[in-house]
Structures are given as structure tokens and as C-alpha cells.
Amino acid sequence: MVHSLELSERGSQSEKHHDIAIQSLQNGIGKLDSLDIEESNKKFVDSTSEDMSKVSDINITLHDPPLIATKGRPQTLRMKSSLEMVRKGSSTCSYCMKNGHTKPKYPNLNQTR
């Protein structure tokens, strides 16, 4: 099975590869047809059916992979109230109590000191 997949992969690379693959398959089919395989064919069919029954009797159980903790802070499951969801307004300065800036960014603080 693996060889046939490899052959089809290589045969699909170009038209020349395809022609060579087809010729080799036709030669192989001709060689197989010329062999006397009636007796060995029965043994082969019986052995493959026995092998298939052995494989089907095996029970394989698959389990989920283990969970791995993700990076970062975990999300909270707590539902926020409507007051928490309201965005805060613009910042007010603690020095002059005006909106639009904060004390570290106060425009005239360096000049007054």
C-alpha cells in the first residue's frame, strides 16, 4: 500500500514520470498474469481473512489527552454588576480638581515650584 502511494505521488510530478509509472505497472501486471498462482491464492485469501478477524477482536479504548493549564491570568467567572460595567469618566487632577489631566501631568506645576 505504501509503495502504491509513493508511486502515485512520484507519477503526479510530471507527464514523463506518469508515463514511466504506467509502463512499470503494466509490466508488473503482465508478470503477475503469467505466474501460476491458483493454489497459493487460496492460502493467501485464507490467511488474510484470519488476520483480519484477529485485528477486529482487539478493543482499543482512546482517552482524552490531559488538560494543560494555559498561560496568563485565568478569567473570572463572576458576573459583574451594571455599576462595574460602566466606564469611568475622564480623570480629574488631584491638585486643581479639573478634568482632562492628572497631577503628574499638571501643566503649570513645574512652574509654580
Image (tube, rainbow, N blue to C red):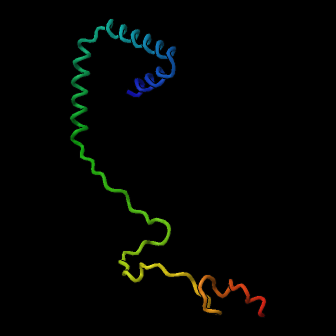
Q: Position of residue 20 (x, y in %)?
A: 48, 13
Q: Position of residue 9 (x, y in %)?
A: 46, 25
Residue at the location (44% across, 22% down)? 7
Residue at the location (36% across, 7% down)? 30
Q: Quadrant of the N terminus?
A: top left
Above or below 41: residue 109: below
Q: Quadrant of the C terminus?
A: bottom right
110 vs 66, nearest the viewer = 110
Q: Position of residue 57 (x, y in %)?
A: 21, 41
Residue at the location (45% across, 15% down)? 21
Residue at the location (23% across, 37% down)? 54
Image side of residue 89 versus residue 65, left or right: right
Above or below 84: residue 47: above
63 vs 20, nearest the viewer = 20
Q: Position of residue 15 (x, y in %)?
A: 50, 15
Image side of residue 77 versus residue 103, left or right: left
31 vs 11, nearest the viewer = 11
Above or below 105: residue 46: above
Above or below 32: residue 102: below
Query: Count the marks: how many?
Result: 0
